[in-house]
Amino acid sequence: MKVSYLVEINDPQLHLVKVTLTTQKPTSTSTLEVFLPSWSPGSYLMREYSRHVRWVRATQENGEVLWCEQTAKGTWLIDWKKSELKKDLAGVSFSYEIYLHELTVRTSHVDNTHAFLHGPSYLMGIIGGEKNPTIEFRFPPLWSKLSTSMDEVPGPREKFIYTASDYDTLIDHPVEIGCQETDGFMVDGIPHALAFYGEVYPHGNNLKADMQKAVTEVAHNMGEIPFTHYQFITHFAPKLYGGLEHLNSTALHFDGRRLGMRKDYLTFMSLTAHEYFHAWNVKRIRPKALGPFDYRNEGYTTMLWLAEGLTSFMDDLFVYRAGISTLEEYLDFVKGNLEAYYGTAGRKFHSLEDSSFNAWIKLYRPDENSKLSSISYYLKGGLVFNVLHAQLQAKGKGIDDLLRLLWLDYKKRPDTGVVKEQVYAMVKELGGDDILADFQRMVETTQEIDFETTFKTLGCEIVWQEGAPVWIGGEWDFAGDRVICRGVIMDSPAAKSGLNAGDEILAMNGLRVLKEDVDKWGQMLKNDQPYELIVSRLGKLTKVDLVPEKGPRTIKELKITDRILAEKSFRRKTV
């Protein structure tokens, strides 16, 4: 079905966008159904975008109103038989107004400075599919630029009209409109456009050059670029962080104040590499369950360890291989991942497959119990591929060989996706039955992983240090000087005492507790001594008996013991 869209932004300060979808009346039925997705590919949470719809209206091409009824949370039915019409015409328009004022990579944001339009959050589709849709954008004349990876329809310069092959492709192209800074670079003859919105502090780094280095490393690692052009849309604003992959573009969010801080700058480079690599791994190499999409219902898969875990292992590695970070800086990021892994008790209860399948209700809905019941498939998945890389290295192979097999398999059957048995077969081909058995165990079970042996084979050593001499095991939030328990660590003194998330700590042994006291507890308190806490729990004063203990050991560093071996271990393999 041929469909055209008109997107109108007339008063951006109101955060409202009018969309008109125009098509032809179906020939085989008297009804037409339109829908707005409930979620976005790459972000596994039901976000219920239709809650932002203000009104809808269906009309014929002569303006006569058609009968239209909402039949589900994001679905509307147009019925010609129930309409009172003077003429029965072929053309039909479905218009609606939607409120867009949430600046994340998974949502849309419109205000008087710009418009960021994320396809699934504002573009309705027709149930049954549509072919070669076109879309036109109209916006205030003071906005001078539109940045997107969509294919532009040739025409007058004052019109912004684009096309896509189908609805899936249409909504897979985010759009930035406004007065954003634009730039770009070439990689192997392929243009990569940059669009930057927001403010940054002066930082002295060459952002464009380093992004180009990271992108070039990813592309050369994969051996070819599977698109004709690429678009980066980057938003800088305080406390922003995130990214979302698209077919040949990405949206990045980062706190622009932090680009002058070395570790944060490297984090942004890793984010860039992560989302760019997704153009291969996820948008093309993908678990079979992730496409075609059912945008109105959850898309369950147990293979996000491949989609996100593998990508999480590669992102920091790409930055190191590109020469942006040093080996020590790279290993410091790995150390942080190991610390997070050991600090997540949920690894004992959820396997990578469990974590993936439950993404819809766990990872994107964190609470005080999250780290106690599950583990991120990003985090553990990345570390598992680190182990696999080390094991393959011992047999003269490596992660690059697995990437090559995955890419060759995709090119043989680009529309089918992969199942875990195919990935397992590739691991077996490269490493044999013993490595496959270990990899399968790491993916499917909660058994502990021997990271110490792994890193020794890579020329590194995990150096441990004694835990805190006095440890409570609580995590704290502060409201002014007030101290509020955000959560407790499993088997910690706080957990044993019965301290609850949400408890406000009022006093300890009869003395008032304030924010400044928390950092001094390690000096003021003694192990194995009881302390009486007075907490406010649901407004009621409650006593809690707390006995501090010595804290668990922590990782001091990931030390290089054999630099030549370590550099060789993490270098890109050339074929």
Image (cartoon, grey):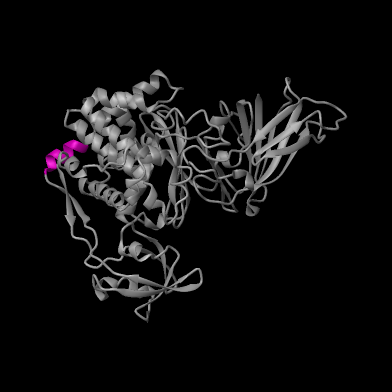
Residue 516 is drawn in which quadrant? bottom left
Between residues 295 and 301, which one lies in front from this camera angle?
301
Q: Residue at x 27, y 30 (%)?
A: 400
Q: Is residue 297 left or right of residue 187?
A: right
- Please identify the quadrant where the C terminus is shown: top left
Residue 564 in the magenta stretch? The answer is yes
Residue 552 is drawn in which quadrant? bottom left
Residue 252 in the magenta stretch? The answer is no
Determine the residue located farthest toward the right in the rendered image.
86
Q: Is residue 234 above or below residue 512?
A: above
* Residue 443 coordinates in the image, percent (x, y): 32, 36
Residue 413 is drawn in which quadrant? top left
Q: Is residue 480 above or below residue 370?
A: below
- Residue span colored magenta: 562-570
Asked whether the viewer can see residue 437, the reply is yes
Q: In this view, does 30 lie to the left or right of 256?
A: right
Q: Is residue 317 left or right of residue 146?
A: left
Determine the residue located farthest toward the bottom in the rendered image.
510
Q: Residue at x 26, y 27 (%)?
A: 401
Between residues 380 and 219, which one lies in front from this camera angle?
380
Q: Is residue 525 above or below residue 97?
A: below
Between residues 40 and 155, which one lies in front from this camera angle?
40
Is most of the magenta stretch helix, strand or loop?
helix
Asked whether the viewer can see residue 206, the reply is no
Between residues 39 and 250, which one lies in front from this camera angle?
39
Q: Residue at x 35, y 62 (%)?
A: 495
* Residue 394 coordinates in the image, percent (x, y): 16, 32
* Residue 460 coordinates in the image, percent (x, y): 16, 44
